[in-house]
Image: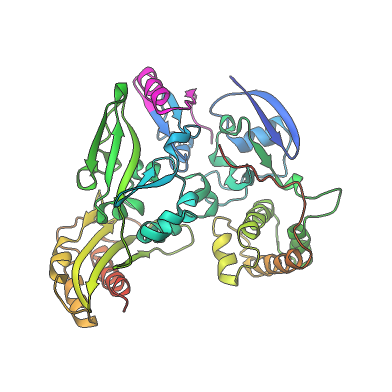
Amino acid sequence: MTQITVRVDGVSYTDDVEPRTLLVHHLREQLGKVGTVVGCDTSNCGACTVHLDGQSVKSCTVLAVQADGSEVTTIEGVAEGGVLHPVQKAFHEMHGLQCGFCTPGMIMASIDLLKENPSPSELEIREGIEGNLCRCTGYQNIVRAVQQAAGEMGSHGTHTAPETTGAQA
Amino acid sequence: MIPAAFAYARPTTIEEALQAIADGGDDVKVLAGGQSLIPVMRLRLAAPETVVDLTRVAELRGVCEDGDHLVIGAMTTHHDILVDPLIAAYGALIAEATETVADPAVRHRGTFGGALAHADPAGDLPAVALALDAEFVIAGPGGARRTVAAADFFVDYLTTALEDGELLVEVRVPKLGAEWGVRYEKFNRVAQAWSIVAVAAAVRHEAGRIVEARIALTNMGPTPIRAKATEAALIGVDVSLETVTAAAAQAAVGTSPSSDLNAQADYREHLAQVLTKRAVLAAAGI
């Protein structure tokens, strides 16, 4: 067992983990952060996407020990004071989901996309969420949701949700 | 799916990493970005005794220049490559290919050196390194370094010139200036899929005439391979659809593509010709 300290959604946790423990399992099973889901278990679907030191990663393809000393933001940490993040709000309003299983990862990938490219074209949105699969094939409304969020975030200045920005070690 | 248990080492310097590899037992795996290794370990296709994680070895990460070469640290991530000003200025072919690797989340973790050392025949960066005649700087036990040319680095399917106990440190790539046109032409069927075939092309032309052509193929055999017949046929020709098509018709000469669920070998040979034609025409500005 290896002791790690990870700051998740603004709270610091110190735990013993096996080196083989995947970050997504640590988040769900040790920290109870079940908002992040396991979809495919093959690094394809992106349902488990979280932000590690401010960058989107597939948490099934990162070892928990690799997050030691890092900041993790999950879907549970993007709303602020009970107010949905603009991307969450846009997915709700544009009905950017059908069954909803891909939604946590879609939203985390979209937030990361908009951080790098605040006003993406439709093609750039599709490429930006390329690593996230919606098995309901509900991509049209997902793209519309990201477009709406981009518009809202652009017109209201920089969103100040507890997003991490630290450089990766 | 969870990997089999392993011992974990997290060095912070190249020296510590080499020591950890030396101390790790008979079956040591070096973890770079982990975007291929972790899936393989989850499937238990690999079950190493020790994993040496390089993500905290800061000296392995970053791009710098050394005369007429770019020097790319092995742990430079794909995302680092895509935002690097030196790559933008002198490494356009690397950037074009890197942009097609997997998806943004994978590119945040996956590394330039890791992709090359993994040497997947369907990976995009090996062909780019081969086309550019990159040099691989390898550190061995005790820290001694040796340099291996790209043509000698890729040995076989998932196999490189890296020996047990060695570590890929950096890759030196000749700078390509504005006199070069480049194109990475990739064929795959769906988002984030591997290349069925791809072509990395760099062409230097003067007044519409090709004076130098570097073309390498992805997934046309167990290792990336130069399209030497096409390269030779392009030298000195005036660029046109006809001349490039004729040269590209020889793109599959000397290749040994596999047949698998994605494509039969003869279809891959056809793709190599079509994609080479497109890549050279685009690189030559047509």
- The residue drawn where x is 72% and y is 44% is A35
Residue stretch in magenta: B1-28
Q: Nearer the viewer, residue B84 or B184?
A: B84
* Rendered residue at 45%/40% (across/down): B61
- Can residue A146 be seen here? The reply is yes
Residue at position x 27%, y 71% in the image? B280
Residue B23 located within the stretch drawn in magenta: yes
What percent of the width, then of the height, locates residue B25? 37, 18
The correct choice, above or below, for A24 with respect to A161 in the image is above
Residue B237 place in picture, x, y as percent: 15, 76
In reply to whether residue B102 is colored magenta, the answer given is no
Instruction: Looking at the picture, tell me which residue is in the foreground, B153 or B254.
Output: B153
**What is the quadrant of the C terminus of chain B in the image?**
bottom left
Q: Position of residue B217 (x, y in %)?
A: 26, 59
Q: In the rendered image, which quarter is residue B36 located in?
A: top left
Q: Position of residue B229 (x, y in %)?
A: 13, 64
The tally of labels here is 0
